[in-house]
Amino acid sequence: MDAGQITSNALKYPLTNFKKVLTLGILTILSSLIVPGFLVLGYIFKIIKSTLKDSSGLPEFSEWTSMFADGLKVFVVLFVYSFIPVILILLGTWTTILPMLTVPGAGSLLNSSIPLDLVGTTAFIGLGLLIVISFLIPVALASMVHQDQLSAAFRLKEIVGRIGEIGWVDYLIWYVILLIVVLVVNFASSFLIFPLLIGIIIVPLIISPYLTIFFARSTALVYVYEESGHEYYRHSKQIE
């Protein structure tokens, strides 16, 4: 598996239909209304599904009810996986901050007797779990889409086995590259937001949906590792 080749394909993929990127951007902007947010997640599901079916183009924005339902599935997966680590991180952080907050005449809001090292350990464990979970989530989502079963996203034995088939080293390299791309693009886009009012529009309208599409495409391609005979890889071999 060539992680660089997958990343290159996924980076070019959103550019195949810029109008759809903008459509997803509009939904992203409207995500505070909740329903559009689930539609954004549903489009992630749709991209993974179309890629697994050898499609090289962005899927249509259609069958909105179905897309909303698929978005709910993606949300459930993300929520269940991240719930415990996020709670641990928040618990550790809140227990650290609360004793520092004071009310005039009353003193600290919380005279905590919890050792600071225990608080730090709680947050550290939560962060560690979050890193591990973020490593598994791409394959969990792809497994759910591939098998068309929500429960497939929680079959850890199958998920770990799939990563083993892809190759732990190859998958780790892909994952690191994915993180680097997301971090670099987000860092670069931060310069647009603060000095320019227009950046507040450009980021959610173009950059955020671009990264969303990139993530979904890259996730699907890494899931159909080279030995699967997927059209993308057959084409890549012909080029070589």
Image: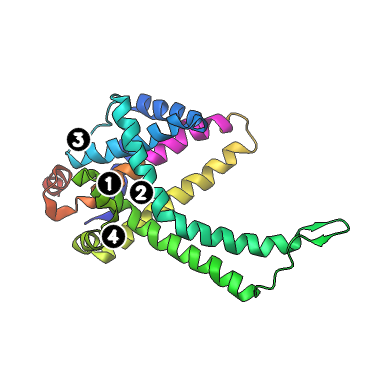
Asked if 235 appears above or below 36 in the picture, the reply is below
* Residue 86 on the magenta span: no
Q: Earlier in the sequence, mark 4 or mark 2?
A: 2
Secondary structure mostly taken by the magenta-highlighted segment of the chain: helix
Secondary structure category for the residue under label 3? loop
The mark found on residue 150 in the picture is: 1
Residue 89 location in percent, x, y? Answer: 54, 61
Q: Earlier in the sequence, mark 4 or mark 1?
A: 1
Magenta residue span: 200-212
Residue 72 location in percent, x, y? Answer: 36, 38
Q: Is residue 124 visible?
A: yes
Marks 4 and 1, how far apart in space?
Answer: 23 Å
Q: Earlier in the sequence, mark 2 or mark 3?
A: 3
Mark 4 lies on residue:
171
Marks 2 and 3, how far apart in space?
Answer: 24 Å
Residue visible at 39% across and 55% down in the picture = 81
The mark found on residue 77 in the picture is: 2
Kind of residue at badge 3: Ser
* Residue 201 on the magenta span: yes
Residue 132 location in percent, x, y? Answer: 39, 63
The reply to whether the C-beta atoms of the residues labelled 2 and 1 are less than 8 Å apart is: yes
49 left or right of 23 in image: left
214 left or right of 90 in image: left
202 left or right of 58 in image: right
Asked if 60 appears above or below 173 in the picture, the reply is above
**Closer-to-camera residue (231/238):** 231
Mark 3 lies on residue:
55
Secondary structure category for the residue under label 2? helix
The reply to whether the C-beta atoms of the residues labelled 4 and 3 are less than 8 Å apart is: no
Q: Earlier in the sequence, mark 3 or mark 1?
A: 3
